[in-house]
Image: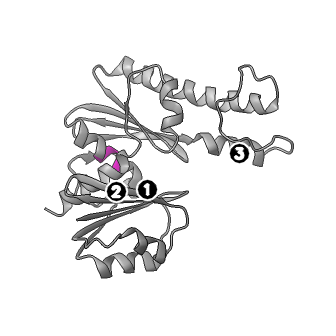
Amino acid sequence: MNLIVDVGNTSTKVAVFDGKIKLSQSRINELSCAELEKEFGGHKFDRAILSSVRVLPLFITELLFHSIPFVHSLSHKSKLPFKIRYSTPETLGSDRIAAVAGAYNLFPGESVLIIDAGTALTYEFLSGDIYMGGNISPGLKMRLKALNEFTDKLPLVELSDAFSSPGANTMEAILAGVITGVTYEINEYIRTFENKQTGFKVILTGGDSGFLKDKINHPVTYMPDIVIDGLNYILEYNAK
C-alpha cells in the first residue's frame, strides 16, 4: 500500500494507492498529527511519499518515518524518469515536479504543456524526457484577494460566473477582469506553444481547473489530481 501526502499552500491532499490503483483521496484543511493519522484508515502502508510547498512541522515527518518502512521526501534530488533543465532546481516546487511526472507517465515521450490552476497559475513544459521549465503567475483567488488588499475601496469578491462583461457594477467589473484576464492568458499561452510546437498535449489540473476548463479554446486533458498521480508514480519509481 502507498500513502501519498501532498501539502499545498491552502490544504493537504492525502491519497491511498494499491500499486497503481487509487483507492481513496481526501483533503485536510488544518494539518495536524491527529488528522493525518485519521486518514490512514487502518491501512498498513509499505511506502509513502511526502511533497510540500511549505515548511512542515517536525511531527509530520516523524509520524511517517516512524510508521512506514519506506518514506520518500520529494525534491529535485529525487530519482526521476526525466531530466530537469532548470538553472535553479533547488527552488523548483515539488508539486511542479510531481505534475510533470504525472504528465510523463500519461504521455511518455510526447510534448506536454501542464497548466496548474491553483493558488498560483503555473505553466510547465515537458518535451519528451526533458522538463524545459515553466512560468508562474497569480491564480484566480490570489488576484481577487490582491485587488482587495492593495486598494482602499475594492471589495473582496468570491469567485463566481455571475457577471457580465463589461461589468455592470464593481463586483462584476472585478470578476470580469480577473476571470477574463486569466482565460485570455491561458488561451494565449496555448496559442503561443501551438505556433512553436506541433502535436503537443495540454493538461489542465489544480483546484480551479474545473471552473476554467470550459473557458479554454483548445482541447485539453482535464486531470484535476495529476499531482497526486505523479507522486504515486515517483514513489513507485524510487522504490524499485
Q: Secondary structure at mark 2?
A: strand
The residue at the point 51 percent across, 69 percent down is 31
Q: Is residue 235 above or below residue 57?
A: above
* Quarter the N terminus occupies: bottom left
The residue at the point 66 percent across, 41 percent down is 143
Q: Which residues are magenta?
A: 97-101
Residue 86 can be seen in this image: no
Q: Earlier in the sequence, mark 2 or mark 3?
A: 2
Q: Nearer the viewer, mark 1 or mark 2?
A: 2
In the image, what residue type sits under mark 2?
A: Ser
Pointer 3 residue: 146
Who is closer to the viewer here, 229 or 113?
229
Q: Nearer the viewer, mark 2 or mark 3?
A: 2
Q: Earlier in the sequence, mark 3 or mark 1?
A: 1
Distance Cα–Cα, label 1 vs label 2? 30 Å
Q: Main secondary structure of the magenta part?
A: helix
Pointer 1 with pointer 2, Cβ within 8 A: no
Specify the label residue 91 is tagged with: 1
Q: Earlier in the sequence, mark 1 or mark 2?
A: 2
Q: What crowding class fits label 1: few (fewer than 14 Cα within 10 Å), some (14-19), or many (20 or more)?
A: few
Q: Position of residue 4 (x, y in %)?
A: 33, 61
Location of residue 137 by image quarter: top right
Residue 188 falls left or right of residue 88: right
The residue at the point 48 percent across, 57 percent down is 8
Specify the label residue 197 is tagged with: none
The residue at the point 37 percent across, 54 percent down is 89
Residue 152 can be seen in this image: yes
Who is closer to the viewer here, 148 or 82?
148
Pointer 2 residue: 24
